[in-house]
Each structure stands twice: as structure tokens, then as C-alpha cells.
């Protein structure tokens, strides 16, 4: 099957491309050949070291310019309701993110993994699914669960790990689970979501369910073994899934340049024999459009697609991380100018669908909703001590009952109040 919308793949590095062109011109004259070769060598060496280089534009699908204007003839003309839904979800998750980080700093939750800068990639891709389709999230797709109806209070219950949390505090914060919303509980182990998603999609097809699975991964996950087995299995067996890689340029402190020597991550799809597409992950319209196309292909029985969404993780990997120790703040500043929310708001304003007054009212409403959800979640007490040993065996074995007895005997003696270890 031919690659989708891909003019991939040329071998020149983006940063060095103009220089390489000039070199090639000079090299046409035999006398200059040796010197040109030497220059060419230096281009290859210099390119990866360039400070704050933006990713290559190779094969990148964009519909919106950074200022929110539409590329000529590229407006997908989505219905007003869809456009407003996309915007509202992006703004909501941004506010949720901001407040949850504050709660973490105040010690009211133990840990949080922020999404700032990646709102368009998640919201745009999830919106392209039908409600019956399944989502297999990686680390930063909590917004997907909320888009599927997980209430903000339930999400905060999970972050606190209180007694009202579905997993009774047994999962790390941000590892939401929401079966009714067809949102699979995330596995922390990098890359495992890929094989889970591929397998679930195959199971759906075997059962005859009209379901597509959207599986997420990060750039770091492309180095995991599961990437190979998942991609290979998906393509060979034409699994009805879309594998969506959020290339946010970092895997904790490892930059993309140390993660992969390929010019793009998208091109890895070619090696496995599946359609692939590289999209501007900060352009919600482009993300929505390419994912919609990939989902339709999977639903029609034409197998998987690999999507690389080029975006940026603007904050630390998690609330436990300090990114100023390993990356240049100038890089963060450069990406702030490509903000996905500002870009899409500018588009909506140009189309007359949004204005300052709507923005103020809407943001006030979200702030209130988040406040109410925090207040409601914090009213819930901790999980009962008995839940330490329940839900694993049909009948709790004697040694677990004994251990529970020991824990209960410690109650009220202050020995059970450990700090969150991360
Ligand atoms: C198999 C495995 N190795 C290492 C880790 C520790 N770890 C947690 S997140 C992470 C980086 C993930 O980077 P990426 O896939 O790019 O996702 P991002 O955090 O950028 O969204 C690592 C190495 C892990 N969870 N699982
Ligand atoms: Mg990453």
C-alpha cells in the first residue's frame, strides 16, 4: 500500500539541506569536488549540534499557519459544533493541567504529568473517533478520558487516590481508567500500549465488532521492543488500528536526536509496510483531518496507519522533573510561539466564531468547574485499609488476612503516613 500523503523520505538533514544544495552545485565542477566533499562532511557533523533547531518540515501536514490563518485552499470546513468542541476541550485540559500542577506543589496530590503544548495532538485525534472506538493511552492522554465523559471529579479522585477512585488508589496518578468511555487503563511501561492496541483491534475484528483502536505512544517508545512487535504485527495482520506517536521531542531528559537517527519517526511506518503520515501536532485541524482519514481506512478493512504528530513538551516530564537541568530555555520559548491553543483561537476569531467576551465567559466557567471538582474530590476519604487485600483473590488467603491485621494494629500510631516516594 502506498504511503499516505507522504513525500517522504529524503536523506538530507533539514538544518543542513540548503548548504548541501549549494555543495552539490559546486561539486558539479570537477576541480571543486574534493573541497565540496570536505564541506559536505562538516554539514553533516554540524547539523545535529545546532542549538534549538526546530524539527524538519519533511512531509509535514499542516492546515494552519502559526498565526491561525488557513493555508490556501486547505480549510476542512468542519461544522461549527466540531470546531467549538475542539477548542473548548483544549482550553479545558489546559486549565485542568495548570490547576493539577498547583495541587501537586501544594502537596494535595502526589504526582502529575503535564500536557502543556500537546493539547491539539490529543484533542484533535480523539475527536476523529466514533464513540464506539477504543483508546489506548500512553502518558499524556488523560484529556481523552475526559472527552469521553470521565468527570473532572472522577479524574481528581484518581489523582488523589482516594476511596472514590475506581482503582482505590492502587494506580499511579494520571493512570485513569474509564471502561464506559472505551478508554483503556494506561500501562506505565513504555511502548506496551502499542501491542495492547494492536491486539485489541484484532480481537474486535475477529468478533466482528465495527471498532477501530487508537493507540498512543511517545517518541521514546519508538525505541522500545514493543514498537517493533506492535508495528510489525499490525501491518502483517492488517489490524484495524491507528498508532499515534506524540513526538514531543523529549523522553524525560533524552532528546529526539539521541532517540533515533531517522530523519522522521513517521518514515518508520514504511519499513513495516503500513501507511504513514507526519502531521503538525500543534495544528488541531491537521491532526483531526489526518486521524479521521486513518480511522476511515482502518474501519474500511485497509489496516493500520502510523501517525507522527510533531509537537513539544513545554514543561517537565512530570512534577518530579526539572527540565532546566538538561535543556535550553530558548527552545521552550521558540515552541511557545507555536502554541496550539492560541493558533486555533486565532482561526476561530478570523471565522467569527469566537471573541474576547466568549473567551472570558468560557474560561470563568471552566475555572469554576475545576474548582467545584477539586472541592468534591477532596471531600472523599482515603480507601479503606481492607482494600489492600481485596480484588485480587476471590477469597482472601490467610496470610494476607494476617498482614492486614498487622496493618490495622498500626492505625493511629502515625507509622502509616509515608510521603509519596517520587
Ligand atoms: C520500559 C520502560 N522504560 C523506562 C521507563 C521510565 N520512563 C517513564 S516515561 C519515560 C519517557 C517516555 O518518553 P516518551 O515515550 O517520549 O513519552 P513522553 O513522556 O515524552 O510523553 C521513561 C523512560 C518506563 N516507564 N518503561
Ligand atoms: Mg516524548
Image (tube, rainbow, N blue to C red):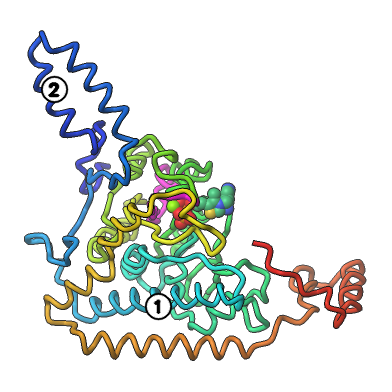
Whether 386 is drawn above or below 195: the answer is below
Q: CA distance from mark 2 to mark 1?
A: 50 Å
Res 106 → quadrant: bottom right
Q: Is residue 257 left or right of residue 155?
A: left
Q: Which residues are magenta?
A: 233-252
Q: Earlier in the sequence, mark 2 or mark 1?
A: 2
Q: Where residue 260 is drawn, which disc sits there?
A: none
Q: Is residue 259 magenta?
A: no
Q: Is residue 78 left or right of residue 386?
A: left
| Image location (x, y in percent) of residue 13 | 26, 34
Residue farthest to the top?
Answer: 31
Q: Is residue 395 left or right of residue 259?
A: right
Whether 200 is drawn above or below 145: the answer is above
Whether 416 is drawn above or below 332: the answer is below
| Image location (x, y in percent) of residue 366 | 38, 86
Specify the quadrant that holds the C terminus: bottom right
Q: Which residue is identified by label 2? A: 24
Q: Is residue 234 magenta?
A: yes
Q: Is residue 202 visible?
A: no
| Image location (x, y in percent) of residue 24 | 13, 22
The structure residue drawn at horizontal position 66% and vertical position 80%, both measured from the top left corner, is 162
Amino acid at each position: 500500500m502506498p504511503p499516505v500523503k507522504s513525500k517522504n523520505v529524503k536523506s538530507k538533514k533539514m538544518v543542513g539541506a540548503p548548504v548541501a544544495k549549494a555543495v552539490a552545485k559546486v561539486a558539479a565542477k570537477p576541480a571543486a569536488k574534493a573541497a565540496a566533499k570536505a564541506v559536505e562532511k562538516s554539514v553533516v557533523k554540524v547539523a545535529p549540534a545546532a542549538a534549538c533547531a526546530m524539527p524538519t518540515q519533511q512531509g509535514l501536514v499542516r492546515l494552519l499557519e502559526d498565526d491561525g490563518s488557513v493555508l490556501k485552499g486547505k480549510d476542512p470546513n468542519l461544522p461549527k459544533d466540531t470546531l467549538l468542541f475542539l477548542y473548548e476541550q483544549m482550553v479545558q485540559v489546559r486549565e485542568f493541567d495548570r490547576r493539577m500542577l498547583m495541587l501537586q506543589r501544594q502537596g494535595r496530590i502526589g504526582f502529575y504529568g503535564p500536557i502543556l503544548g500537546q493539547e491539539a495532538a490529543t484533542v484533535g485525534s480523539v475527536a476523529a473517533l466514533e464513540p464506539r472506538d477504543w483508546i489506548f493511552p500512553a502518558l499524556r492522554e488523560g484529556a481523552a478520558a475526559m472527552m469521553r465523559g470521565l468527570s473532572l471529579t472522577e479524574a481528581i479522585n484518581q489523582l488523589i487516590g482516594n476511596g472514590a477512585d475506581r482503582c482505590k488508589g492502587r494506580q499511579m496518578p494520571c493512570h485513569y481508567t474509564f471502561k464506559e468511555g472505551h478508554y483503556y487503563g494506561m500501562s506505565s511501561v513504555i511502548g506496551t500500549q502499542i501491542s495492547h492496541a494492536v491486539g485489541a483491534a484484532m480481537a474486535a475484528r475477529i468478533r466482528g465488532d465495527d471498532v477501530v483502536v487508537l493507540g498512543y505512544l511517545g517518541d521514546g517508545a519508538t525505541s522500545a521492543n514493543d514498537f517493533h512487535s506492535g508495528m510489525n504485527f499490525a501491518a502483517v495482520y492488517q489490524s484495524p488500528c491507528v498508532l499515534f506517536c506524540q513526538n514531543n521531542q523529549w523522553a524525560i531528559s533524552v532528546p529526539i536526536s539521541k532517540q533515533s537517527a531517522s530523519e522522521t519517526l513517521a518514515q518508520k511506518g514504511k519499513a513495516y509496510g503500513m501507511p504513514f503520515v507526519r502531521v503538525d501536532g500543534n495544528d488541531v485541524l491537521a491532526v483531526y483531518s489526518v486521524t479521521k482519514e486513518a480511522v476511515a481506512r482502518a474501519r474500511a478493512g485497509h489496516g493500520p496507519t502510523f501517525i507522527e504528530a510533531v509537537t513539544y513538551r513545554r514543561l517537565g516530564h512530570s512534577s518530579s522533573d526539572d527540565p532546566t537541568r538538561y535543556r535550553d530555555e530558548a527552545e521552550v520559548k521558540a515552541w511557545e510561539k507555536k502554541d496550539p491553543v492560541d493558533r486555533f483561537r486565532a482561526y476561530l476569531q478570523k471565522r467569527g466564531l469566537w471573541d474576547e467576551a466568549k473567551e472570558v465567559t468560557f474560561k470563568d466557567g471552566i475555572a469554576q468547574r475545576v474548582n467545584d471538582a477539586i472541592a468534591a474530590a477532596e471531600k472523599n476519604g482515603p480507601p479503606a485499609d481492607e482494600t489492600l487485600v481485596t480484588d485480587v483473590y476471590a477469597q482472601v488467603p490467610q496470610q494476607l488476612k494476617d498482614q492486614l491485621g498487622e496493618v490495622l494494629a498500626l492505625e493511629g500510631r502515625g507509622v502509616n503516613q509515608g510521603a509519596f516516594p517520587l
